[in-house]
Structures are given as C-alpha cells and as structure tokens.
Image (cartoon, grey):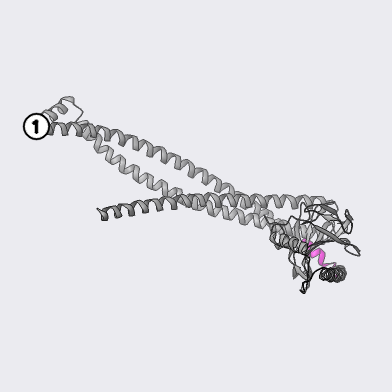
Amino acid sequence: MIGVSKKRFSVITLYVLVLLISLSVDAFSQTSMSTLKKRKEQNEKDIAYTNTLINNTVKNKKVSLGRLNLLNQRIRSRQALINSIEAEISHIGSQIRQKQNDISKLEDELDKLKKQYAKVIVYAHKQKNSYEKLMFLLSSKDFNQAYKRYKYLQQFSEYSRKQGKTIGEKKDSLAAKIVELNKVKGEKEELLAQKTDENKKLSAEKSQQSALVQNLKKREKQLRDDLRKQKRYAQKLQKEIQKIIERQARLAKKSSKSAGKYAITPEDKTLSLSFDKNKGKLPWPTKTGFISEKFGEHPHPVLKHVTVRNDGVNITTDSKSDCRSVFKGEVTHILSMPGLNNVVIIRHGEFFSVYSNLATVNVKKGDLVQSKEKIGVVYTDSSQDQTVLKFQLWKGSTKLNPAQWLYRN
C-alpha cells in the first residue's frame, strides 16, 4: 500500500509541476510581450520628440553640430525602434509555432475521437431496434447478467453522448485556436510592414547625416577653434569646482572630529546616504530631453582622429526649458563664465550637482532647494540651433557619470 501511495504521490507531483511550468511559460510569454510593446512605444515617443526639436530648427536651414546631434539621436532612436520590432517579430514567430503545434495536436485528438465515435455510431445503429435490445436483455442466463447488460446499455448510451459532446468541444477549441493563430499572423504581417517602412526612413536619415557631416567638414577650422574654446571653458569650470569642493571640505573638517579626506557633518552624512540610495532614480534636470554628449572621452562627431572629453553629460532639450535640481540640497555657488553662461552648484552632503549653460537663474547662494525645484532656464544657442544643459555630478573630488544616476526608462 505504501508503494502504491508513493507512486500515486509521484504522479500527482509530476502533474502539478508540469501544470505550474506551463502556467509560468504562459505568464512569462505575456510579460515579455508586454515589455517589448512598452519598449517599442518608448522608441516611437523618442523619435516623435526628436522630430519636434528638428522641426523647430529646420526653418533656419543652418549647418550646425546642434542639428547633427538631433539627427544622430533620431537615427539612434530609429535603430532602437527597428530592434524592438525585430524582437517582437521573433517573439510572435515563437507564438505562431506554438499555436501551430497546439492546432496539430488538437487535430490529431479530434481525428482519433471521430474514428472512435464512428465505431460507436455503427454499433448503435445495429442496436437501435428496441426489440433487439429487449431480446438482448431477455436472453440473459439469470437476473444478475440481465442487470449487467441493462447497465451496459445505459453506460454505452451515456458514453455515446459524452463522445459527441467532447468532439463538439474539441471542434470549438480548434476553431478558437485557428482564430488566435490568424490574429497573431496578422500582427506579424503588420510588424514586418512597419519594419520595412522604418528601414526606408533610417536609410534616408543616414543619407541626410552623411550630407550634413560633409558640409560640416568644410568648416573644419571653425570646428577646431570652437573645440579649443570649449576645452578652455571646461578646464576653467573644473578648476573652479575643485576649489569649491576643497573649500567645502575644509569647512566640514572644522565642524567635524573626523580626520578623513572629506569630512562631513552628521546631517550631511545622512543627506549623502539618501542621495547615494537614489542612484539610477534621480529625476532629470530638465523635464524633456536626451543625452546628446555622453560622459568621458569619445570621438568628435565630425573631426577625424579628434577626441572630445566631457566631465558630465550634455542634455539637449526644448527652447526655454526649465532647469531643475535633481535632489534636495543647498545652493553653494552661482558663477558666470564665458562660454558656459550661468553655472549653479548645489551641495547634497558630500555630493555636488553642477548645472551649466543657464540663460537665467532663479535661486541665490545659500538657498535650500528641493528635488525638481526650478533653479533656472537653459540657454539657447541660436548659432548652433540647440538648447543644451551641461550637467555634472561629483562625489567629493571624484567625477561621476550622470547617466548612471539619472532615472532610466
């Protein structure tokens, strides 16, 4: 008995596991499809936003790095959209194969049921005469056999009815699966058509990009002069930031017994920990925009063999866009610098956020600001057709990559 129980338990356990795995696969499939759709929708929104920025600059018809940055961003978003479409097509392809397998199994089951039912119908036809049924019962040897024959006729009748019902249910299930399959195939065809359309647009945009780069190369001397100026501005800002950080460190050491390299007060330590916990969750310093120049060293978009260094990130945004604090803190300095316009520096414990290239400033030194509080308006460079916020993050004297700290979709 124990052996039988164990065997029965194993069969039940196996059945439950198979059921759970099946449900998990279905849930995962639905979740991944939902994720793919959301990613595609975000890609489409990114393209629409970049198109808006491009349309606002098209009237000027200037050949500028600003326009090239916008076009590069649209190409990146377009390629990301195509990748999302391809991922969706691949996922739908798996769904189609699964549904085709399900349909094939249902068709086999239905075929077997029909064959069994055909035999039942033939037998039932032979036994349809009531006289023959009566003779079948009366020819029994005894009452017990007659009762068994009677129950057999009842069960056979019930079995026939159930077989007919099962066949009907299988037919309905098969029809529903075929409808689902055709729907998914239709979605795939739509996606394939969209992919073809997006590839055409991408090709046209790359041609525009190539033409714009060639036009900008004709102004190589000016580009190099502009780059040298930007480098000087960046170096000057970096020196100022480092002076400010060192000054803040000296002040903190005076008010703290700690002998560390960068001593901070208990209040600042709490703020620093809070800031640190929000890595990857900080709000963007502008309501809209995209990173048009990333952190660190990277090739110049036009000049060959020329490397550009950025101590933060450049965020291209809308004209007259507000600049916001990314976290609560204290405004420690407001600077006015050539090439960077107005600069606001906010301290968050041992962290510092730096907002450069502001046309106007809405705060003053010593102000306590909250997360997302307006601190100024980003400057628009009409000669370059762009509105760019230069944003930096520091932890003590260490430069951080802002892209790793800002909220990511």
In front: 254, or 88?
254
In front: 161, or 9?
9
Q: Neighbour class for label 1 at 10 Å: few (<14), some, many (≥20)?
A: few
In the rendering, at what x and y percent does residue 162 appear? 31, 35
Residue picked out by circle 1: 142
Left/right placement of residue 213 relative to residue 133 reads right
- Amino acid type shown at disc 1: Asp
Q: Residue furthest left?
A: 141
Residue at image position (37%, 53%) is 13
Q: Residue furthest top?
A: 131
Left/right placement of residue 168 relative to residue 184 reads left
In the rendering, at what x and y percent does residue 304 appear? 77, 72
Quarter placement of the C terminus? bottom right
In the rendering, at what x and y percent does residue 277 appear? 69, 60
Q: Residue furthest front?
A: 257
In front: 107, or 341?
341
Instruction: Read off the magenta span.
Output: 211-220
In the rendering, at what x and y percent does residue 344 appear? 86, 60
Does residue 332 show up magenta in the picture? no
Residue at image position (79%, 50%) is 55
Does residue 215 show up magenta in the picture? yes
Q: Main secondary structure of the magenta part?
A: helix
Question: Does residue 46 lie above or below 303 as drawn?
Answer: above
As helix, strand or loop, the secondary structure at mark 1 comes to: loop
Left/right placement of residue 206 relative to residue 376 reads left
In front: 45, or 333?
333
Q: How many marks?
A: 1
